[in-house]
Image (spheres, helix red, strand yellow):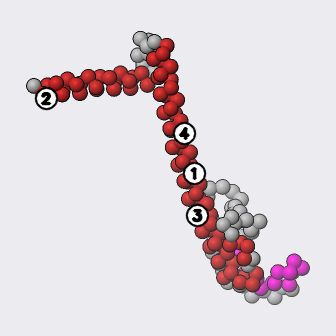
Amino acid sequence: MFIFLEAASLRQQLQYLQECHRQLMGEELSGLSTKDLQNLESKLEMSLKGVRLKKGNLIHQENIELYKKLDVIGKENVELQRKAYGARNVNEENESSEPSFTITNGYQLHAPIHLQLSQPQNQTEPQPQNNIPANAIKLGLHLH
């Protein structure tokens, strides 16, 4: 006997939940009073606030991860500069958590950029006027 009462109670709860779901989806609203509609609107607004809060938290976490990746790339860039030019020409301020450089390939913003160091070629040209030695390694990457 107890199982039959339990089943009836569960069936009634299921019907109530299905009715609430339909109302939240905007169906079968014609029989609702003004107060019921206002309560439904409040529930929807609270749900929307929860969704926006969750979305904001996810975006915030993604930004944190992107800044960490940017910091790693900046440190790798400083290390590449040290290897290429020696420690005397690399400013220590470039190691800060907010690197002051941008990398662009001139074509697509989101295309991968591949960097590769190469050995300087023997050049017999005179030293340029911009104080860069003629035998300096040229990476083909411009930092601004």
Tell me the amino acid under the disc marked 1.
His
Disc 1: CA contacts within 10 A as few (<14), some (14-19) or many (>=20): few
Q: Compare residues 61 and 111 and report the one nearer the observer.
A: 61
Q: Looking at the image, tell me whether mark 4 or mark 1 is earlier in sequence order.
A: 4
Secondary element under disc 1, as helix, strand or loop, is helix
The Cα–Cα distance between marks 2 and 1, rounded to whole angstroms, is 49 Å
**Range of magenta residues:** 127-140
Q: How busy is the neighbourhood of tag 2: few (under 14 within 10 Å), some, or many (20 plus)?
A: few
Q: Earlier in the sequence, mark 1 or mark 3?
A: 1
How many angstroms separate mark 1 from mark 3 (CA)? 14 Å
In which quadrant of the rendered image does the C terminus lie? bottom right
At label 2, the amino acid type is Ile
The residue carrying mark 1 is 60
> Callout 3: helix, strand or loop?
helix
Rendered image: mark on residue 69: 3
**Tag on residue 3?**
2
Tell which circle, 2 or 4, labels the residue nearer the N-terminal end.
2
Q: Residue at position x 23%, y 27% from top?
A: 10
Q: Which label's residue is closer to the chain start, 2 or 1?
A: 2
**Three-letter amino acid code at the position of disc 3:** Lys
Q: Indicate left or right for 102 with 69 as reference.
A: right
Give, as a three-letter code, the residue at label 4.
Answer: Arg
Q: Earlier in the sequence, mark 3 or mark 4?
A: 4
Q: CA distance from mark 3 to mark 2?
A: 58 Å
Residue 140 visible, this angle: no
Report which quarter residue 90 is drawn in.
bottom right
**Front: mark 1 or 3:** 1
The residue under label 4 is: 52
- Distance, label 3 to label 4, CA atoms, is 26 Å
As measured in the structure, the alpha-carbon distance from the residue carrying label 2 to the one carrying label 4 is 42 Å
Whether residue 96 can be seen here:
yes
